[in-house]
């Protein structure tokens, strides 16, 4: 299939240059530094000899258990697992292997929004012909859309991030606030709390552009249209009215001092959460685990937090959105794509692995066998004081989620959005101006890469 030579060459050269300092310059060492393409590099012990081995890169915290479970359950294939780094660290190594044409694993864990970036370089395999029909009903349509490019499927969804609103029950009780069901009510509640001398109601972190994208889609935006069947063309619409409305809304909250502007996932932000500086946290289903690990909700704050469905722009037409999530993809360097697809479909899909994942707040499972498990649905979440958050909030959001269309430009778009959100937080531009600048920036970049922008 034809690809944009400029885009592929640019992506490869930029990343290869960035990685040069990490490479010895020796081709063999560069390949081996890519990690687990060699079954001799396994982190785990392979218990069954004389059967085919599939190599895997993944960084889930419980992957050792997951791999051991898979190997115990299978006599026809074994998995050799290596953790070559989390997120960007793994992607850098994968990009190096793509450029070299060797060194990639058979199966790789990839965040859903990064799949098109690698698919456009012919680095991933469409798994529809390798058993997809047998497991298709184990996941929702929205889950499959997130890992697809056009009609082709490039990953098996594992975990997701249906969004909701975490809030401090003590703040809401003190100021007589009930969880807002619309964004208009959210602003009204924020004003009530601030007028009474209360804390900021939330936070607009410039470093979480995926949240803004999700909220814009929730209002009706459609940032990208892209199909591998027409790889020369891409639709980009980042300054439509819905996108501008959402950016203007949050810019207004910042201007009125109703929400903060602290970057999230930082010690400063966590300190603020612990100190009660924010009444709400617009987040995803993985957030309770993240906050617990960061020391939030302990001691005097134990049981302080509640959770409610994400506020809606139009309550008559509710839209559920997602933040985060990963999948297992088969790479084009897999020696046996069919066997690699079997691993991608079946690893982290057994009951013991899924249960360990959600029990320890490692994943929010997308496998419907877990979502439909009464034990998962009725789990009394300690972070929320025993509230059945899965049943009441997160599972309904996951079931109603219809999926996003990501683009091969996703990381550039996120970086560009971060720059514009920072300008909004500084008060130097309006939300609408940010949308116009973002659109111009990303369209220009897309054209530089050889795309025809629709």
Image: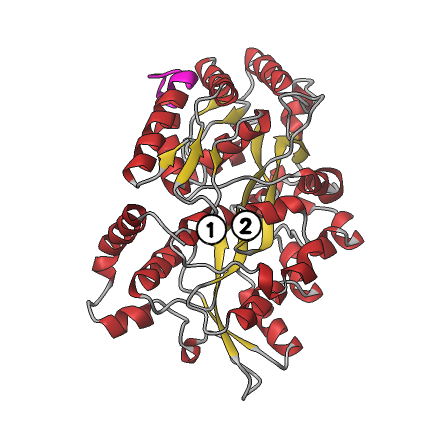
Q: CA distance from mark 2 to mark 1?
A: 7 Å
Residue behind mark 2: 147
- x, y (%) of residue 311? 64, 26
- x, y (%) of residue 37? 40, 72
Q: Nearer the viewer, residue 187 or 417?
A: 417
Look at the image and give the residue range highlighted in magenta: 424-433
Which residue is at 80% across, 52% downward? 374
- Is residue 298 visible to the viewer in this orientation of the structure? no
User: Residue extending furthest bottom?
Assistant: 50
Label ID, residue 46: none
- In the displayed structure, 371 sits above or below 425; it is below
- x, y (%) of residue 434? 38, 21
Tell me whether the residue at label 2 lies in contact with that at label 1, contact meaning CB atoms closer than 8 angstroms. Answer: yes
Q: Nearer the viewer, residue 205 or 38?
A: 38
Label ID, residue 115: 1
Residue 104 horizontal side relative to residue 346, left or right: left
- In the displayed structure, 401 sits above or below 332; it is above
- In the displayed structure, 375 sits above or below 438; it is below
Q: Nearer the viewer, residue 23 or 203?
A: 23
Which residue is at 31% across, 51% downward? 8
Q: Nearer the viewer, residue 333 or 256?
A: 333
């Amino acid at each position: 299939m034809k690809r944009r030579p400029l885009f592929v060459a640019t992506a490869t050269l930029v990343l290869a240059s960035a990685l040069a300092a990490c490479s010895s310059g020796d081709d063999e060492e560069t390949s081996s530094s890519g990690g687990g393409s060699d079954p001799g590099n396994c982190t785990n012990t392979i218990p069954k000899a004389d059967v085919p081995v599939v190599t895997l890169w993944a960084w889930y915290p419980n992957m050792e258990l997951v791999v051991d479970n898979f190997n115990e359950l299978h006599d026809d294939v074994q998995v050799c697992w290596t953790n070559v780094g989390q997120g960007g660290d793994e992607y850098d190594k994968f990009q190096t292997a793509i450029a070299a044409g060797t060194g990639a694993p058979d199966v790789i864990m990839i965040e859903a929004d990064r799949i098109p970036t690698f698919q456009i370089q012919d680095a991933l395999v469409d798994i529809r012909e390798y058993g997809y029909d047998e497991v298709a009903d184990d996941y929702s349509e929205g889950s499959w859309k997130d890992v697809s490019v056009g009609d082709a499927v490039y990953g098996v969804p594992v975990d997701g991030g249906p969004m909701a609103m975490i809030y401090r029950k003590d703040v809401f009780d003190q100021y007589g606030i009930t969880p807002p069901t619309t964004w208009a009510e959210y602003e009204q509640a924020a004003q009530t709390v601030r007028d009474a001398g209360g804390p900021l109601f939330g936070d607009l972190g410039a470093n979480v552009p995926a949240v803004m994208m999700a909220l814009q889609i929730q209002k009706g935006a459609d940032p990208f249209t892209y199909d591998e069947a027409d790889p020369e063309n891409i639709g980009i619409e980042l300054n439509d009215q819905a996108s501008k409305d959402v950016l203007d809304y949050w810019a207004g909250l910042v201007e009125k001092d109703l929400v903060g502007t602290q970057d999230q996932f930082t010690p400063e932000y966590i300190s603020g959460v612990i100190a009660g500086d924010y009444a709400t946290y617009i987040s995803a289903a993985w957030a309770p685990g993240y906050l617990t690990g960061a020391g939030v909700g302990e001691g005097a704050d134990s049981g302080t937090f509640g959770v409610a469905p994400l506020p809606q722009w139009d309550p008559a037409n509710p839209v559920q959105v997602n933040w985060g999530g990963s999948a297992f993809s088969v790479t084009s360097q897999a020696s046996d794509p069919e066997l690699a697809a079997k691993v991608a479909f079946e690893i982290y899909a057994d009951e013991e692995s899924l249960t360990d994942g959600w029990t320890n707040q490692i994943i929010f499972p997308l496998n419907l066998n877990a979502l439909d498990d009464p034990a998962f649905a009725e789990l009394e979440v300690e972070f929320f004081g025993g509230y059945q958050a899965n049943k009441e909030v997160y599972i309904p959001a996951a079931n109603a989620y219809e999926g996003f269309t990501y683009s091969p430009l996703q990381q550039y778009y996120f970086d560009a959005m971060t720059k514009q959100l920072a300008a909004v937080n500084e008060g130097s531009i309006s939300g609408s101006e940010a949308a116009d600048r973002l659109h111009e920036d990303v369209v220009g970049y897309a054209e530089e890469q050889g795309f025809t922008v629709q």
